[in-house]
Amino acid sequence: MSTAHAHVQPNTFLFLRLPSELLKLVEIRADAIIDIGKFGSISSNSLLGRPYYHTYELLEKRAGEAQARIRVVPAHELNAEVVTSAPTPAESRDDSEATAGTNGVPEGYDLLSEERTTGMKNNRLTVDDASRQALSQQEIEELKKSSGGKEIIEKILANHAGLGEKTDFSKAKYMVRKTKKYLKRFTVLPMDLGTLMEYITVKEPARILELREESLGLMVAWSNVHCCPDDDVERDAAGKRVGGGRWLVIDETAGLLVAAVAERMGILFPDSEAQGQDDGKASSQRVADKSDAQPTADTSTTEQAAPKLVIHRDFPLPAPTNTITLLHPAVQPNVSLLKYFGYDTNQPDTTHPLHTHLKPLSWLSLLHPEEDPTYREPETATPAEMAEWKSGKRSAYFKKRRRWERFQSIVDEAREGGFDGLVMATSMDAASILSHTVPLVRGGGHIVIYSPAAEPLVKLVDLYSRDRRAAYMQHLAEGQQPNADDFPVDPRLLLAPSLQTSRARAWQVLPGRTHPVMGARGGAEGYVFTARKSIPLEGGVEARGNFTAKRRKVNAPPPPPSSDSIG
């Protein structure tokens, strides 16, 4: 993580992890108020410039203060609050004194002794209700106004009549519940993909097709997405572009997949240092242009200054390498999650790397560009006609021309093909998509597809299987055209199709109580399809005849002696 993302910066998004383990999404702006729910509110200026991953505690307001103050909770204080009570019998893995009881469990956990009576302290007969607490709810509310979180917890524990009846493990769970409820603490976390996925998974998992972090990790790993800073584009013998760090992406996860690919390519976060250098170069360039525009005595009137290339930030020409071409079915792509990383498509930041490295393209423009009115060249005007226009009309004319030039370059580059790979997460029919997108991938490119269910991807594995490929080539060898219903895609274009899944489950690990976390979220399992692009050999290779291995002679007579051996 760069220096700019190591500390809290203004006009950015971050997360606050509350004691209840829930995440709160916050946009940091100068001189703003941050509401932290029942804990109160703080000023955003108190977080600006502070490092991430620190835990803060809200302090009581002083007289005349509008917002609460915060303090950094040191690490030794956080570690000291870990449950320090004595462990229950045989709770440690290194406890060699634990012996098996009569019921086949450690003696400390055997609920019944040999006399069939209760052998150890347990919660079977404990009555834990509101009557065991001497403090009323009104008194606890008064304590919240005058005391800190630690004092409230101590008084609640001191006034609990049944605390001594609880086991050590039950006391620890009771202490954790009260700590989460009354300690006014939060941890500041930066905006990253893992935390954002955790937040969206709790709020609205269908928005990202129930994509989990481990499935997203599989996708970016198998797709071989990486940074390609070289500006030179490789071309084949026909002059077409090949590679260059260009990936084709189909995203129906509101921009989450685009963000993951952009992070691997190093273009997800804006570089503040590079931004400052670009601003400095732009200002120096403007000064140089002004100085060049002034005539001098030594300059000949016949000499003309060389034309300078002016780069406009509203519709700049896209970058040639290290780019993401995003296919979408609508007029504009749905990448709303990119705003959390500093890039909003409605009001794009012209200094963000995605402004020139992200190339949105609709299916209509890719398959039928002549039917897209944006692809049609606008009417041109002569210099004499533009001289009679007002400045506003001339500005609109050149802006329209720049938008068309940018759009035309994106369409022509996409139709030319040569992409390094295809990464997609969509609910559309994958077979209908691959028939148009696989030919655009270079030879040896990676194809990675995510689906919440396994059935669509199982169908793909069958369409590109070895048996179907052999049948397809048999039709071609016999001079027949394969039926489109039996072969909706060309099975020769993908090799080694495979289907895999990965899901990390949370477990509670305790002696005698090890099991999956019962409150863990369910949802779709999530499956990933992977394959490699292959280029069929033009003309084909045929082998005719029956070829069998030569049989070895077992009882053959020995060879006759040679003349040399006789002499």
Image (spheres, rainbow, N blue to C red):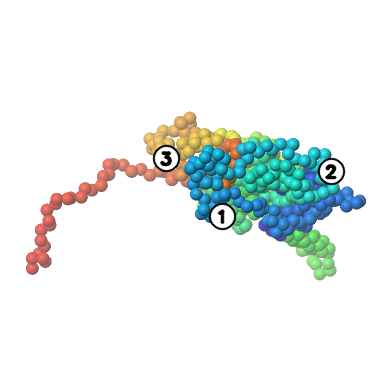
Name the residue: 56% across, 55% down. 234
- Going by the numbered disc 2, the residue's amino acid type is Glu
Quick one: label 3 or label 1, which is nearer the N terminus? 1
Tell me the distance, in whole angstroms, between the alpha carbons under discs 1 and 2: 72 Å
| The residue positioned farthest toward the left in the image shown | 566
Nearer to me, 263 or 131: 131
Quick one: label 1 or label 2, which is nearer the N terminus? 2
Q: Which residue is mark 3?
A: 466
Q: Is residue 58 left or right of residue 363?
A: right
- Going by the numbered disc 1, the residue's amino acid type is Glu
Of tags 3 and 1, the one toward the viewer is: 3
| The residue positioned farthest toward the bottom in the image shown | 298
As helix, strand or loop, the secondary structure at mark 1 comes to strand
- Going by the numbered disc 3, the residue's amino acid type is Arg
Tell me the distance, in whole angstroms, between the alpha carbons under discs 3 and 1: 32 Å
Nearer to me, 128 or 9: 128
As helix, strand or loop, the secondary structure at mark 2 comes to helix
Name the residue: 50% across, 41% down. 114
Q: Which residue is mark 1?
A: 234
Provide residue 287's location: percent of width, then percent of height.
81, 62
In the image, which disc is placed on residue 142?
A: 2
Quarter the N terminus occupies: bottom right
Nearer to me, 338 or 18: 18
Of tags 2 and 3, the one toward the viewer is: 2
* Crowdedness near tag 3: few (<14), some (14–19) or many (≥20) residues, C-alpha within 10 Å: some
| The residue positioned farthest toward the front in the image shown | 115
As helix, strand or loop, the secondary structure at mark 3 comes to helix
Quarter the C terminus occupies: bottom left
Does the residue at mark 2 contact the one at mark 3 (Cβ under 8 Å)?
no
Name the residue: 61% across, 51% down. 87
